[in-house]
Image: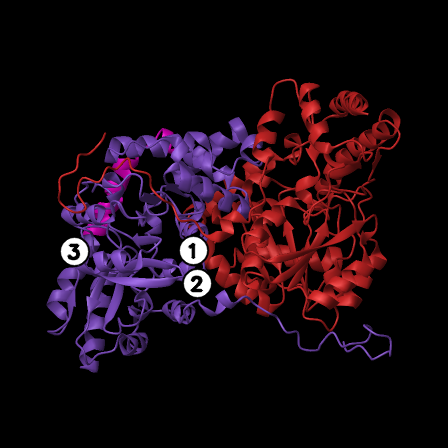
Chain colours: A red, B purple
Amino acid sequence: MYWYATGIPGIGKTGAEKMNYRFADRMQRVPESFLGELFRVSRHPGIISFAGGLPDTSLIDAPGIAAAAREVMEEEGPLALQYSTTDGYLPLREYIAARYRTRLGIPAEAAEIQIVNGSQQCLDLVAKIFCNPGDPIGMERPGYLGAIEAFSLYEPVVYGVDLCDDGPDLAMFGRVVEEHSPKFFYGIPNSQNPSGRSYAAETRRAIARILEGTDTVFYEDDAFGELFFDGRPRPPVKKHLPERGILSGSFSKIVAPGMRIGWLLAPEPVLTQFNVAKQAADLHSNFLCQVILHRYLSSFDLDAHAQRVAAVYAERCRVMCDLLDDLLPAGVTHTTPEGGMFLMAFLPDHISSMDVFREGVRQKVAVLPGVPFYVNGGGDHSIRLNFSRSTAEEIKEGMARLAGVIRSLS
Amino acid sequence: MYWYATGIPGIGKTGAEKMNYRFADRMQRVPESFLGELFRVSRHPGIISFAGGLPDTSLIDAPGIAAAAREVMEEEGPLALQYSTTDGYLPLREYIAARYRTRLGIPAEAAEIQIVNGSQQCLDLVAKIFCNPGDPIGMERPGYLGAIEAFSLYEPVVYGVDLCDDGPDLAMFGRVVEEHSPKFFYGIPNSQNPSGRSYAAETRRAIARILEGTDTVFYEDDAFGELFFDGRPRPPVKKHLPERGILSGSFSKIVAPGMRIGWLLAPEPVLTQFNVAKQAADLHSNFLCQVILHRYLSSFDLDAHAQRVAAVYAERCRVMCDLLDDLLPAGVTHTTPEGGMFLMAFLPDHISSMDVFREGVRQKVAVLPGVPFYVNGGGDHSIRLNFSRSTAEEIKEGMARLAGVIRSLS
């Protein structure tokens, strides 16, 4: 495989010589991730994993989606397989807009909605349209890891605001807005990933009051808002702040993640820029799945389905919280989610979540250490626990193992 | 809808006041686009449009894809609807790798392939992992518009290299590489969009020789390589330059664009960074369509299908070229594609392509002015013509109209 020097310039330099790839500086900004290693470990046979973040596969209505797919392919196959517009399938955008109007009382129109590849793509493109390197942005601490990763590639300066039981610490939030004027503040007001916390109604109003008259956008990620255990929708911050609020949503948690269909609802000037970035990123989202999804939703009671999913997760969450209270040593506390798929447990100061992770693997229970969720450091004494993917039986066995792990480290 | 001042700080500022959205500087870099307007105009009733870039919908095998979709939904529906890994569906990546080995003699492995949302996403993510603002990159002139748009958002300095009938001007290419050391050079060696030109075999080898020993990556976009009219595959530049070559491909032109499935083949160090960027961008590509596509391809002769498509386009291209020769005034020249979906016509110096566009709309024939394809200016006397979407009858009528347009401007 070696080539020999010929004496002719440019010929005979060995193809095997070391290539120097000159990557962009931004690639150094992605937080060191031990997650790949962690996910590999969590798949070891016999491990009960609370480390992941998947919805329960058995709650996906595969037969219903199959029927919709069959109809679409029979009736409009060739067109659903052709290129389409960047903004997305209009009937699907109209469905989403109508749902905002009826469910949340937001006067949304299809023209304000852009379809994306799951709401993760909003994280990438919102940062892209707003952030120069060094620009200030704000986010919750702990915050969503996928957001930290997506934002970091645009090299912003990230100001973390502590997330308390009823939402961001308002004094700290106000200070960050006043002193640093972040381009946007990113948060998950409903059943946050990783903490499971939801903003109180009064916190939502207070945030809107603080932001009014500023040039800071509130970027609200609503991946879990349909999974409140009590079935009651919570008004988004955007309702109080129409011009300064952008709101992303997703069908991943209530229909099917594998279709990768989410959306952004935003005021026209933002959506115009977002659309430019979306077109440059991938022309448009998978059109076939947009058409199938719309067909599916047209004859499907999504509210009832979401409530069935939420009821299953509610029971699993209750079992997990009860066992955390009953089995874990004193000094371990946890959040008590009103919805979603995650909760967070907090360990005594002398126990590191990384040790819990390592010892957990030995005792066959996987958890996610809190460290990567905390911008600007910290979080070593917290762990994220997922309750959507495990049965009550698995949660019982897993919590017993976790109690053993923490006791062995105490 | 107006709120009244209350005297309480933060309350009563009117929600209707003008919000100042502070977008990133990069959003200023996207070339002014008249394409939206143009595409709207091209859809006017009665217009024959050569301005678009779509494959012929009637050549999409919707029944075959429908059958594959049915099987997937019946046999593995829930799993195909769940989250998946960032790199993509392994059997699909194995299929693509095997095809490189058998079709092009490239020793590709699934581990070197990342699935993306159509090869447009490669343009975004390759620029993302390589380009700091101000970094040098190179590309063909004229060049693919989607690439110019995607790259521009990373604010590189773009060096255009004239694209001649047999590939990039080699002296100019060598000078750009030596003087500016571009991070990568982007090109479409097979039936380029917009020009329809293909690199000669000797040009491919010469490019490899010039790049050997440099730190410039050759980024080769192979959207049309399966649509050579003679059915003969052309070896990619990467074959001569394994460590410095990255190669994107797509099922959009030979299976179905609406599924948005493409891929990148790249050396491991590049793919590792690319994978980080892909995960931050959207976690993974639509998994349902990856599984359906793989199922479809497993029992389908893609080579034979691609040749059927190519034969249809070959005939349309021939009709268009003949009519350009027969009907258009002296002084109009054109490229003669060996494959793909586009050709380029060149007008005499006194005729502007923008005038041809405007007068064309009046005479009900739409063409794409060349200007946006030329980085660093120029191109006003060229037009891009698409021949994949129109029947021979439409091409005949459209060329007659175009001849009238150009004659009226002479």
Tell me which amino acid carries mark 2. Answer: Glu
Q: Regarding mark 3 in the picture, which secondary structure is present there?
A: helix
Q: Mark 3 lies on which chain?
A: B
Q: Main secondary structure of the magenta part?
A: helix
CA–CA distance in space, label 1 to label 3: 40 Å
Position in image of residue A62 (x %, y %): 59, 34
Please name the residue that numbered disc 2 is placed on.
Answer: B155
- Residue B312 within the segment the image draws in magenta: yes
Please name the residue that numbered disc 3 is placed on.
Answer: B318
Tell me which amino acid carries mark 1. Answer: Cys
Quarter of the rendering occupied by the N terminus of chain B: bottom right
Q: What stretch is highlighted in magenta?
A: B296-314
- Residue A388 within the segment the image draws in magenta: no
Tag 1–tag 2 contact (CB < 8 Å): yes
Q: Identify the residue shown where x is 27% and y is 64%.
A: B384
Q: Is residue B338 left or right of residue A74?
A: left
Q: Which chain carries label 1?
A: B
Circle nearer the N terminus (1, 3): 1
Position in image of residue B316 (x %, y %): 21, 55
Q: Regarding mark 2 in the picture, which secondary structure is present there?
A: loop
For the residues carrying marks 3 and 2, which lies nearer the camera in this image? 2
